[in-house]
Image (cartoon, rainbow, N blue to C red):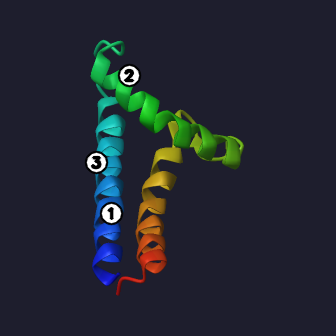
Amino acid sequence: MLIFKSYLYQVFSTILDLYYIGFWIYIVSSFFQFDRSMRWYRFLEALMAPPLRWVRKLTQGRAQIGMFDLSPMLIILIFPVFRMLLAWIFQIG
């Protein structure tokens, strides 16, 4: 049972890491000008936009300072909380 819990923790942890990397790619790519209809960008946008919309809706626009949107930073700060929650769920020390 312990091996199964450890395996599940590794799977979910890897998925979380890949999502974190994809989120950074999405953020950095928003600084550059290119064709936004490219397949890889549409895929990233489909994965990353829903959490951003949720945070923007939750903060009611208070996460925006001038033209800077801080909602991606809020999501990045939430990732370690997810990691700790994952460890607590699977009781990995």
Q: Quadrant of the N terminus?
A: bottom left
**Would you place residue 53 above or below residue 5 in this image?**
above
Identify the amino acid type marked 1.
Ser
What residue lies at 34% left-to-right and 51% top-to-bottom?
20
Inspect this view and state whether residue 1 appears.
yes
Find the distance from the CA under tag 2 to the CA under tag 1.
24 Å
Q: Which residue is mark 2?
A: 42
Density class for disc 3 (Cα within 10 Å; few <14, some 14-19, many ≥20) is: few
Q: Is 83 on the left-hand or right-hand side of 10?
A: right
Q: Amino acid at mark 3?
A: Ile
Query: Residue most toward the right?
Result: 60
Q: CA distance from mark 3 to mark 2?
A: 16 Å
The kind of secondary structure element at disc 1 is: helix
What is the number of the mark on residue 93? none
**Residue 16, relative to residue 81: is it above or below?**
above
Question: Looking at the picture, which amino acid does disc 2 mark?
Answer: Arg
Between 71 and 6, the one lying in front of the other is 6
The residue pinned by badge 3 equals 21
Q: Nearer the viewer, residue 10 or 65?
A: 10
* Left or right: where 72 falls relative to 9: right
- Taking the spot 35% from the left edge, 48% from the top edge, the residue there is 19
Residue position marked by numbered label 1 in the rendering: 13
Residue 33 is at least partly visible in this image = no
Q: Earlier in the sequence, mark 3 or mark 2?
A: 3
Q: Earlier in the sequence, mark 1 or mark 3?
A: 1
